[in-house]
Image (tube, rainbow, N blue to C red):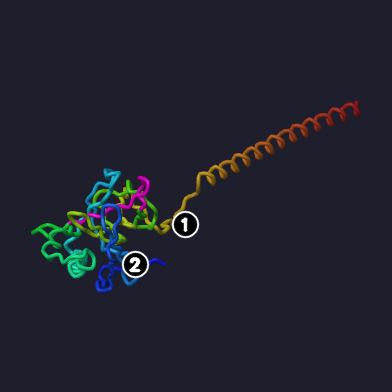
Amino acid sequence: MTQIYKYGELQLNDMEISVPDKQNDIYYSIIKYKGNPFYLQTSKLDIITDCNELNSKNPSIEFEIPKNNLDIYNTFHDLDEKLIRMTYENSVEWFKQKIPLDVIDDMYKRICKPIKRNKNPNIRFKLPVIQNKIVCKMYNQNKEFINVEDIKPNSNSILILHIRGIKFMRQQYQYDIHITQMKVFIPIENKFVIPEECLIEEDFCTPSDDEIVDEQAIREIKRIEELKIEKKNREMEKIKELQKQIDEMNKNLVNN
């Protein structure tokens, strides 16, 4: 199982940096934390970037750190200071020469820029891309998969960052950090207020349309049956009257 480290629980003395290895035009150091890949979970950050206008070749997202949670800023600041100090202390082993601290500091590209007065600090991280496809896993607040295009302005997000290593270039060096996962809290506009529980009380229910139709049909059938009986009774009365007249006629004939 992948080990995730929360930003408030880090002990930076447990971070390990390998000796830089030449890779094409740069030198690269691999970072481990307690012997594991360094996956860092952030606090909730506000998304600034319009995610429908990302750079397709080198996509990244900029975030604002809320003023009520500057602890995450302090974590990144500590990571910056840790790397500067370790680079200075290991410059002879890594680069075969003693490099002055001020030179190392000047060459280093920090994760966070210094905080400005009356302004929340911003921070930017890259999205991993393979064959022109973003491979970062993204979820909404319900842990459902989403696409980067689903991220709306003014959303906020918790990140899993992979602090993979350090890239040493000719003029500068920096952490190699990518967003591995994002949990995005997307604002939901609900135009309808629909209670979750059933509010229907059967005592106040009126007959349904089907029930009304059935009752009307029954009354109509009953009326038709009654009319048939009445008609039959009238016919029987006529037959009896006719039979009586015939009997009278026969009686008269016998007497004559």
Residue 249, x across and y down, in percent: 84, 27
Residue sitting nearer the eye, 125 or 154:
125
Q: Please report the residue visible at 32 percent of the width from the left and 50 percent of the height from the top.
A: 190
Task: Please tell me whether mark 2 or mark 1 is closer to you in this view.
Answer: 2
Q: Please report the residue visible at 72 percent of the width from the left and 36 percent of the height from the top.
A: 232
Left or right: 119 in relation to 92? left
Q: Please report the residue visible at 19 percent of the width from the left and 70 percent of the height from the top.
A: 89
Which quadrant holds residue 195?
bottom left
Main SS, magenta residues:
strand
Q: Which residues are magenta?
A: 122-135
Residue sitting nearer the eye, 254 or 77:
77
Residue 104, x across and y down, in percent: 15, 62
Left or right: 51 in relation to 172? right
Q: Secondary structure at mark 2?
A: loop
The mark found on residue 202 in the picture is: 1
Give above or below for 195 relative to 33: above
Residue sitting nearer the eye, 100 or 36:
100
Few, some or many C-alpha atoms within 10 Å of disc 1 (few <14, some 14-19, many ≥20)?
few
Residue 134, x across and y down, in percent: 35, 49
In the displayed orientation, state which residue is furthest to the front.
Answer: 96
The amino acid type found where label 2 is placed reads Ile
Which residue is label 2 attached to?
A: 4
Q: Please report the residue visible at 81 percent of the width from the left and 32 percent of the height from the top.
A: 243
